Image: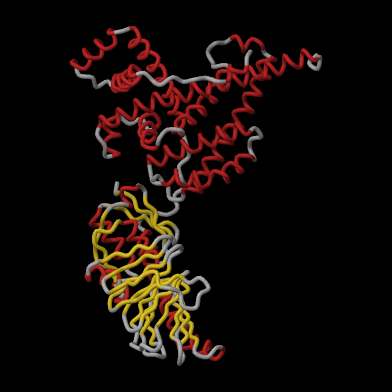
Amino acid sequence: MSGILTEYEASKPALRRYLGRYFSRSQDVEDTLQEVFVRAYAMEARRPILLPRAYLFRVAKHVALNEIARRKNSATDSVEDFEQPDVIGSDTQPGVEQTVDGRRRLALFANAVAALPSQCRKVLVLKKIEGLSQREIADRLGIAEGTVEKHLAKALLLTRDFMARREQIDTDLTSAREMGAVRRLRTGDGE
Amino acid sequence: MSSTGNIVNFPDRSPVEDEAARWVVRHDEGSLTPAEQAQFEAWKQASQAHADAFSRLSGHWKDLDLLAGLADTPAEKPLWKRPQLWAGIGMAAAVMFAVIVGVNQFSGPHQATQQVAEQPGLGVYKTKVGDQEKITLADGSVVTLNTNSRIEARMNGTERTVRLLQGEAFFEVAHDASRPFRVYAGDGVTVAIGTAFSVRLEKDSVQVVVSEGKVSYSRVVDVQEPEPVAFIAAGETALFGENVVIDKIDLAEIDRKLSWTDGKLVFSGDRLSSVVADISRYADIRFEFDTQDLADMRVGGVFGLGEVDDMLEALETNFGVRAERIGDKLVRIARQP
């Protein structure tokens, strides 16, 4: 079994507590946790990780600080955008919404990868994160090229299903919130 | 909105999707032969469902490129440079040597005498990790204590009782029909009159290997003379855990199981994971495997106890693995790059 995977499972509660220092929303903690795992997992594909636990915490800190810096920047950006309305009009740069969405999508993809069965995940990580060809993956893992293809196809379908499920949950949550808002309006608490 | 809106059923994937996924992956690799290309076109044109599934999954496959963003991750800080590795192992060997010297100085007669003064006929013997000791008891029986083990022996006119409190011990029992020789370990007692056997105490079980004569084994539950649950004869090994497992093995295998009494570890076709587990008993080192197939690799050989570095070197040269020393208590076994 992969050293990182074992260590990740063992260190999950501690990592969760650690990330709790950076994020107040538990959903942020969970998303970051999965991202940390996939990043460390991808790194392990490149070189052996000598101290997996220490490394997981190092990556956790890296991801958390990046995310916080990014949020801060986008908050500032939106204020600037507000003060200088002409900036909004330029289509050359991705809008704040888009960046936020991109980052959320990355976390979501990381979650989808983390949820894959182990061999399937390994192959997908080598393909999409490490950028290896199927031939190279086959050599690296000592399996047939056809097997690599099979794993990739499976990974494709499973991640797609995962995303669809998550998007459905998000939609449901949004509609649940809207329902709550409607209820408040009806009882006269809203306005 | 009705509450049923929260429940979504995902129908089982159709075979079309499986096929489409294979084509997407293959197509992306760009290695289709003209024949395969033709086959692909034919498949795609066979039905609108095929074409739709292909284009949906192609889109998702492209989306997965986003994952490349995860590659940008800080690497681990290098701890040391490779050449220092074996220096580390050498140091561990030196530490083990020191342990052996230490034990010779502090355990053995001194401690035993001390205990005798407190309780007549009671001797306590113990070994540290990597150490072994041969002790002759008052009745003439000889006990070989393996690494990191502890016994308490009570010898007097009416009883010969040893408690194995930790580890493993081999007993060559002096014949005396009037005083059965009892070894308590875990929740059981092994009884012999004159014979040779070893008892090893594990976390949840007791293993008995008999090389001469016959012993009986009983569970101890507040009974003076418990009924034996098993008799184990020469050439047999018994494992008393939740269940009792008695195996008849050949003498070569018995010798192998008792090879530690000659200061050697003998392996023949054992899994590497069990080999290193055994080595861990003699050196305060933990092993970790990069992949399961490394742990399952079958290896063989004879190694002197404490020759951990020799063994690792043999592994590196003969089995194409890399043994990487991490800190002073962990060795990571990986495939050679």
Q: Position of residue B219 (x, y in %)?
A: 45, 70
Dividing the picture into quadrants, the one containing residue B5 is top right
Q: Nearer the viewer, residue B254 or B193?
A: B193
Q: Is residue B36 visible?
A: yes
Q: How many marks?
A: 0
Q: Is residue B247 above or below residue B150?
A: above
Q: Is residue A160 above or below residue B253?
A: above
Tell whether B193 sits left or right of B78. Answer: left
Residue A159 vertical placement versus B130 (above, below): above
Taking the view exactly as shown, the residue that stands out farthest to the left is B35
- Please name the residue shown 29% across and 49% down the image: B336
| Residue B96 visible in this rendered orientation of the protein | no
Viewer-nearest residue: B10 or B269: B10
On the image, the x and y values in percent for residue A73 come to: 62, 26
Q: Residue at x 51, y 35 (%)?
A: A34
**Horizontal arrangement in the rendering, residue B28 relative to residue B189 (left or right):** left
> Which of the 4 quarters of the picture holds residue B313?
bottom left
- Residue A121 in picture, x, y percent from top left: 39, 34
